[in-house]
Amino acid sequence: MDYTRADVIRATMHSMLRDGTAQALTQGLPGNEAPGVEITEFRTDFAYAMYRIENKEVENAYVETAEFLKLDKVKLLGPENGSKYQIKVNPGETRDIVVRFGCNGFNIQKTYSYILVKTDEALYKQCLEDGQRQERGAGIALHVLQHQAGVLMVYKNKSESKILNETVTFTIEGLKIEGEASDGNVIQFSLAPGEEKKIKLATLVGGFSFGMGNSYSITSESD
């Protein structure tokens, strides 16, 4: 396996943290909002610094959006690049951001925000239990849940012989449709008896607005 320079630097910094050779500052979120999330920051003597996020929560993912207002003689180490990033740390994961400083002085200023997002499994359960329910008739229903990180839609067909044919037209800002073959913001699909369909819309950076129009028909398998 070939290792890049970035891989070697990260591995070295991980070892320094593990062995206690780095003077690191570890703290939780304000107000102990999520006790399982810990953020560690430390800087080395060889012009690199690490910002590490460890998530020991069970149901909550940590999503951080950051922008560097000043990056003078400072560079993000890949895969992050440019002057901003968004990072998602799922339960049980650890992620880190590494930056390289100039040797003869530098200037860095960062602003960031974060949200706690339930896991896909937890959101799915909440969508079915608490989401807005729209009946399609014949044992077919749509459940819609808006949450901090976007929108989850779950279609369930509990009928014995009916097929749902639906077209969904989204009016969205600050959202993207995940994992769907769509024509712009339009999705068309059919749902047979016993089937389920999920549509996920994820936030980009900042807030979002969500609206949709639905047209559908219900046919029988024998038609």
Image (spheres, rainbow, N blue to C red):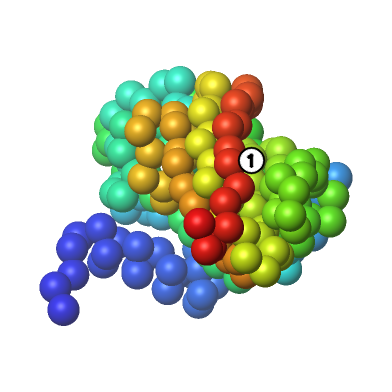
Residue named by callout 1: 151
Q: Amino acid at mark 1?
A: Val
Circle 1 Cα neighbour tier, 10 Å, few/some/many (<14 / 14–19 / ≥20): many
On the image, the x and y values in percent for residue 182 come to: 38, 39
- Using the rendered image of the protein, determine whether residue 216 is visible from the camera's viewpoint: yes
Q: Is residue 98 left or right of residue 170?
A: left
- Is residue 123 shown above or below 7? above
On the image, the x and y values in percent for residue 120 come to: 63, 60
> Viewer-proximal residue, 164 or 20?
164
> Viewer-proximal residue, 134 or 154?
134
> Viewer-proximal residue, 112 or 153?
153
- Using the rendered image of the protein, determine whether residue 39 is visible from the camera's viewpoint: no
On the image, the x and y values in percent for residue 66 come to: 51, 33
- Is residue 124 shown above or below 97? below
| Image quadrant containing the N terminus | bottom left
Farthest front residue? 223
